[in-house]
Image (cartoon, rainbow, N blue to C red):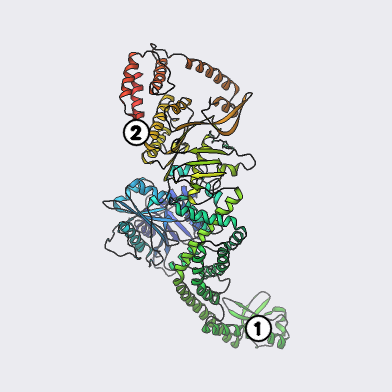
Amino acid sequence: MPQYTPMMQQYLSIKSAYKDAFLFFRLGDFYEMFFDDATRAAQILEIALTSRDGGGKERVPMCGVPHHAAKGYIKRFIDQGYKVAICEQVEDPKQAKGVVKREVTHVISPGMVMDETILSEKEHNFLAALAHDDEQYSLALCDLTTGTIHTTCVQDFERALEELKVARVKEVIVSAQMMDLMREQSWTVSVAQTIDNAAELPFAFENKACLPALLLLTQYLQITQQRSLDHLQQPRFYEPDEYLTIDSNGRRTLELVETMRDKTKKGSLLWLLDETKTAMGGRRLKEWLDKPLRSKQGIQDRLDAVSTLIEGFTSRHDIREKMTAVYDIERLAGRISYGNANARDLVQVKKTVSTLPGIQRAVSELGLPLASLLAEQVTALEELEKLLANSLLEEPPLTITEGDMIADGYSDVLDRYRDAGRNGKEWIAALEKRERDETQIRTLKVGFNRVFGYYIEVSRSNLKNLPEGRYERKQTLANAERFITDELKEKERLILEAQEKSVDLEHQLFLELRQRAQQFIPALQELSRLISELDVLASFAEVSERSGYVRPQFSPTGELSIVDGRHPVVEKMTMHQHYVANSVTLDNTTSMLLITGPNMSGKSTYMRQVALIAIMAQIGCFVPAKEATLPLFDQVFTRIGAADDLAAGQSTFMVEMMETNDAIQKATASSLLLLDEIGRGTSTYDGMALAQSILEYIHNHIGAKTLFSTHYHELTQLELTLDALQNVHVAAVEDQDTIVFLHKVEPGPSDRSYGIHVAKLAGLPDGITKQATALLQQLEQTKGQAAPTAEVGATQTVAEQLSLFGEANTASKAAKKTPAPSKAEATFASELASLDLMDMTPLEAMNWLYRMKKKVQ
Ligand code: ADP
């Protein structure tokens, strides 16, 4: 580096230790970035890229952000998964000999943000450790702001990633061996270089299987945080199978927490259900939506509470009203134990604790089971409330080093300092009065500034009235003179000394107070758990009552019966229009519905509403229906739409097949499958054949409750061969030249697809739709004719493919007689007959079809 200036050399040497972070290099009032950091940051932050002479041959790219506005820029980096290392000047530039000394004071990474202004209040911020031993993957998910840790073990890597995705983990700590693998998957990764497997955990924890991840997490935190880890709570172990699994595609397409199109909360199920009053409640609701329950008892307990809260309208109203005064005590408790809580934080704790008795009374009136737990915490926290009420002023400043925090009467010594200060000030006020009287100068006043301290000010016009030598001249202004006296200076010394001492003492008293508050942390954490749950349950009650939802029942036999169900979000969005309710019945004799109907008629809305109702029931909320009896599902899989997968570079069809494969590999008879227009991504006959074999496979091998929408009318024939499959269609009627969607689901298949009508509705030119109508008629006529046999070229291909479908359907009770096969058809048929479809994956089926098609061509 010799050619670089000393400062650039300093930069490069610091940067070499923080390769995976953007280095914010403090230069006066700016944080500057150089070289690659600068070029990338300029793009990410949309700021100007400049350059500066760094001593080398070429100018060094540079960009910077003002020090006072840094937070906003840091947040943008963090939100996009980057890390930022803050490098400060650690000596006074005026004192520096040579280059000012600089050091990285802290690194901010997505999983390790403690600053509330960067975090979103209604969302957990998880940092995870992922470890792998011979047998399994262990995971530890930690929210540093609250000290919460969840831990689990899973058998395969995919499942581990799924757990990370569900919790929206922001950063993953892994060992060096796993680093590349995780980076390939686009995770923000931090690497723990060495792990001492014999080390002790900072908390008691029995489950040995999770130990590798917990050690990885705690040791990494010890090294990077350089402080005690007392604020970490006892980890909570969970089995992934305790919860309803919703594949990541399902969570996205069912729009559970954000919409697919613009990734906003508005329009999602979370948005609909979120009437929580506290940040803790908001986070809990999201957690419940991420992990609906599978335990019937757990769900019933929540539903019981929701029922009670709906019936007890007045108490619920009272509880919700009081909740508005509840601060985020979960994060406040985190800050207390982490040691960065200020006096304002403690005042918020006090205010929250003082609203508790009111909430607890209302909860007791309702007879909710959590009343007694809440009562325990109210008692446990009485002492804290008293302590904080006696010690703190109501509106302390944000800093803890400038005084104005501690109340009078808390400390005798502090009171004495304050008295000295106050007496001094009174003495000064008296001095002003006395001097005015004695000099007869009515405008004489005593003032204070930081440079000269206390002074007596006399306006220029009154100077003539001032006896010579009465005061000592100190400063001359344009229209006044300022003076001091020995006595004034002596009082000033006493006042300032008292002030300085009291500020120091207040700081010390505050630190002691914060220390004493630490013993109440377990109670505060338990309280936040109770309050957050109460908040979510009251929110469910509020939404359920307002929107006319009913309590779901659970059937021991696996029956699903929804009477007049609605899609909760579409219903809310189409507030002014009429939402058409639809019923569904699925049981062990009919477990699959094949849904046909024109585009835009409401097929996918119908499918989604079933899944949303099931999910709402399993998080313990009432559901949008007149009546609902549901099985307890173990998993929900969806294969709906693929617009944004295209952007990710994979072909729609490949994605469709991969997702379908994932669903049929994992689904069980207790799962819910939503498959929307499977096969749409490939040519008609490929698609149709695949759709059929997938349906048959689910029917014969899985038995999952399945809703399958399709525009292949030919598939409706399957009702004749698959006992558990039933046709339904979404009704539409033709009105002259256009089509009216009734959104009503009715038994039986739809008779046609109305695609041309929809195209008309979409405004396609008349010429096109007329031509399409004519072509359709022609096609419909040819369909009725026997397939031609001896022609070459495209016609033959179509004919053979048509007969393929006929062959595959030979078991169909409605199978038509086909003409005698050609030689090609015969070979084709015999190969087809030898296939064991039930043993093939959809991809293998597709490959086979592809080879056959090539052969035929
Ligand atoms: P498809 O899947 O058949 O193409 P969608 O389910 O996407 O159709 O529905 C198209 C639109 O019709 C929806 O955006 C919604 O506004 C409306 N819709 C669907 N179902 C209903 C219903 N039951 N009642 C009222 N409007 C509905």
Sort mark 2 into few (<14), some (14-19) or many (20+) by Cα contacts within 10 Å.
some
Give the quarter of the image for residue 225. Answer: bottom left
Viewer-closest of 73 and 352: 352
Amino acid under label 2?
Thr
Q: Quadrant of ligand 1?
A: top right
Viewer-closest of 572 and 797: 572
429 in relation to 740, above or below = below
Horizontal placement of 214 versus 91: left or right? left
Q: Mark 2 highlights which residue?
A: 841
From the top left corner, tell me how far across and down residue 842 is, in percent: 36, 32
Looking at the rendering, in which quadrant would you find the C terminus? Answer: top left
Q: Earlier in the sequence, mark 1 or mark 2?
A: 1
Amino acid under label 1?
Ala
Q: Which residue is pictured at 57% across the width and 30% down the height?
A: 731
From the top left corner, tell me how far across and down residue 7 is, in percent: 39, 59
Distance of label 1 from label 2 (alpha carbons) = 92 Å
User: Circle 2 sits in a helix, a strand or a loop, which is it?
Assistant: loop
From the top left corner, tell me how far across and down residue 137 is, in percent: 32, 51
- In this rendering, the count of numbered labels is 2
The reply to whether residue 722 is in sight is yes
The reply to whether residue 187 is in sight is no
Mark 2 within 8 Å of ligand 1, using the beta carbon: no
Camera-nearest label, 1 or 2: 2
User: Circle 1 sits in a helix, a strand or a loop, which is it?
Assistant: helix
Looking at the rendering, in which quadrant would you find the N terminus? Answer: bottom left
Q: Mark 1 highlights which residue?
A: 429
Viewer-closest of 476 and 759: 759
Mark 1 within 8 Å of ligand 1, using the beta carbon: no
